[in-house]
Amino acid sequence: MLIFAVDDEPKALRVLSRAITEAAPEAAVAEFDRAGGVIAAVEGGATPDVLFSDADMPGMNGVELARALKIRCPGLNVIFATGYDDYMRDAFSLRVSGYMKKPITAEDVRVELENLRHPVVPAPRRVRFQCFGNFEVFIDGVPVSTLRGKTKEYLAYLVDRGTLCTGAEISAALWTRDVSSAYIRKLRKDLLDTFTAAGCADVLIHSWHQQGIRTDLVDCDYYDWKRGRPWAINAYHGEYMSQYSWAEMTHGTLEKSTT
């Protein structure tokens, strides 16, 4: 889910964005301090599912922004987050999804997202990671068998961490001896080549010194366990990435949480 947050007041924008992130941790949130930035992003190809916008803004106000976006994005859910009641009539004439009064809380946002005028149906994710039991990778439901052993372990570590990792961190975790940066780059290339060939390279994050996984673009039993999803909690049966000794730390955390 892609959510746009708009407010011309920096503090209010931070509060709004934080509330959205807390209420919808899986969503991608883009912040804007002017309506013009939102229009430019949409004209550039962005397709937000939900717009949280202040109503009273200089230049193009929130009502005018909503009216313009309704033409470009007919299925967009518009939710006003404002300190005024003055715009309520205009909001309802536009058939917006919701109207929240400041200060905005995560609970306010959660209620609005659970009652959207145009429910957002998540697109099926092509990549799935299985962490409970042995670590496995699936693309379009088919196990990926072309990853070399150490490349697969390299990927497993990135999935386990769920954040950006340096080559030095990966090396220290996966090997008891120092390995060259050239070898890390080789694993990185092998992984990138595999996912590029399958058209899924967007799930990988690669910068000059760091690597990671776009957790919002994949399905993963461990990530869903951390989110408290009942099915994932029930799917854990005492095994986590069983083929890798370094995974014992996370395994221990899982065990403590189930006792």
Image (cartoon, rainbow, N blue to C red):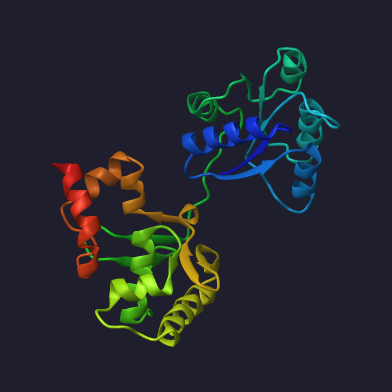
Q: Position of residue 35 (x, y in %)?
A: 78, 37
* 219 over 247 or under it: above or below: above
| Callout count | 0
Residue 170, quarter of picture: bottom left
Residue 161, quarter of picture: bottom left
Q: In the displayed structure, does residue 52 sit left or right of residue 206?
A: right
Q: In the displayed structure, does residue 210 sit left or right of residue 43?
A: left
Q: Quadrant of the N terminus?
A: top right
Which is more toward the observer, 119 or 22?
22
Q: Residue lying furthest right in this view? A: 59
* Residue 6, visible in the rendered structure: yes
Q: Quadrant of the C terminus?
A: top left
Which is more toward the observer, 258 or 221?
258
Q: Position of residue 129 (x, y in %)?
A: 36, 61
* 170 over 250 or under it: above or below: below
The residue that appears at 75% across and 23% down in the rendered structure is: 94
Q: Position of residue 133 (x, y in %)?
A: 21, 61
Which is more toward the observer, 54 or 99?
54
The residue that appears at 37% across and 62% down in the rendered structure is: 159
The residue that appears at 29% across and 39% down in the rendered structure is: 230
Q: Position of residue 248 (x, y in %)?
A: 20, 61
The residue that appears at 53% across and 41% down in the rendered structure is: 121
